[in-house]
Amino acid sequence: MTEKPALSVVAPCFNEEGVLPAFLSRVGAVLDRLGGTSEIVVVDDGSRDGTWQAMVKAAAHDPRIVAVQLMRNHGHQLALTAGLSVCRGERVLIIDADLQDPPKLLPDMMVLMDQGADVVYGQRRARRGESLFKRATAAAFYRLIGRMTDVEIPLDAGDFRLVTRRVLDLLLAMPERHRFVRGMVAWIGGRQVALPYDRQPRAAGESKYPLGKMIRFAADAITAFSVVPLMASMTIGWIMAAVGFAFFVYSIVGWLLGLNLPGWTSLMAAIGLLGGMQFLMLGIIGAYLGRLYDQSKGRPLFMIREIVGGPK
Ligand code: UDP
Ligand code: MG
């Protein structure tokens, strides 16, 4: 292989034959203006249209283009991860293929990175050409996850961002299977800088994120970054245990005062005590399972940004 390029552009593509030529020429033009060595890694995420043929054709004409074909459709986040693991640049731009994220912002992102940013993420000021439903669900999602996690995941930012090789290597070293890339990048930390922009309408074709995929995406994000659902099971466990115990006491007191029908006391006391204990035990199992889950994600315990001084 030849020398490593200074910059890689990585775009996942699913049934994007309609936008691919425009995407490649727009990105190519921006790279030409920037100068320096670069590559464009496009990943065909099991498309059923002519996306792959278009990629192969483009790669034959432009040596900067690297086309990657996945075996089948793996979904946006994994297709992106495939591209990120193939790219070799010192800096990496993550971008959608549909031109909703304008490639012309790249020079501004490069300047912010020259000034020391580890990550420059595009933050959506406006979302043009997207349905009210899409905008409302997206806004709700970013606010919900913001409240449910300690990680500072920026509001209204997609995966459109420029990251350093250092951040990319840390990201790729995280072995978790359900990947919420923008959250993982936020979790890494370092100097993360926002660049506000107006999201454009899709250049061609339709959104490749139907409702089912959106729900799965949100579920992956929340379970990977929040223990709130787990804590809820613990809280409910304690409440039910208290209610069950109160019921137990109530039935015993009734029995002592001779108010209960024969047989009612033992039945209700057992239901109250056992029911309460079961909920509490479920909560406790949940807490251990949560820790096991955290451990199994295999994320690094800490990440060093820089070391200065010491022996060379
Ligand atoms: N995408 C993908 N695999 C999928 C779905 C989407 O690689 O299963 C790509 C798609 O080609 C696009 C990006 O992910 O480059 C974002 O998808 P889309 O624009 O459809 O999402 P939206 O902007 O509507 O949220
Ligand atoms: Mg899009």
Image (spheres, rainbow, N blue to C red):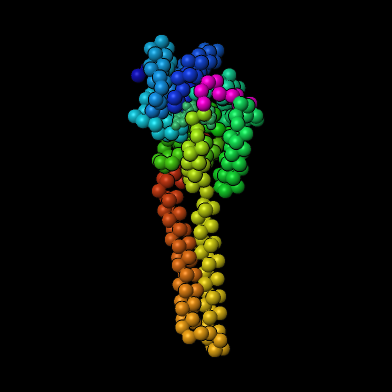
Residue 79, percent from left and from top: 42, 31
Residue 61, percent from left and from top: 41, 10
Q: Main secondary structure of the magenta part?
A: loop
Kindly tell me whether residue 154 is visible in this rendering: no
Q: Residue at x 55, y 23 (%)?
A: 202
Against 218, is 254 above or below? below
Q: Residue furthest front?
A: 261
- The residue nearer to you, when weighing 103 against 38, is 103
Does the segment drawn in magenta span residue 71? Answer: no
Q: Residue at x 55, y 12 (%)?
A: 33
- The residue nearer to you, when weighing 34 against 266, is 266
Against 134, is 113 above or below? above
Q: Residue at x 57, y 22 (%)?
A: 102
Residue 28, percent from left and from top: 50, 14
Q: Quarter of the image containing the C terminus?
A: top left
Q: Residue at x 39, y 31 (%)?
A: 73
- The residue nearer to you, when weighing 88 against 58, is 58
Residue 195, percent from left and from top: 62, 28
Does the segment drawn in magenta span residue 203? Answer: yes
Marks counted in the figure total 0
- The residue nearer to you, when weighing 43 against 272, is 272
Where is residue 282, by image quadrant?
bottom left
Kindly tell me whether residue 71 is visible in this rendering: yes
Q: Quarter of the image containing the N terminus?
A: top left
Extent of the magenta region? 198-206
Q: Residue furthest top?
A: 61
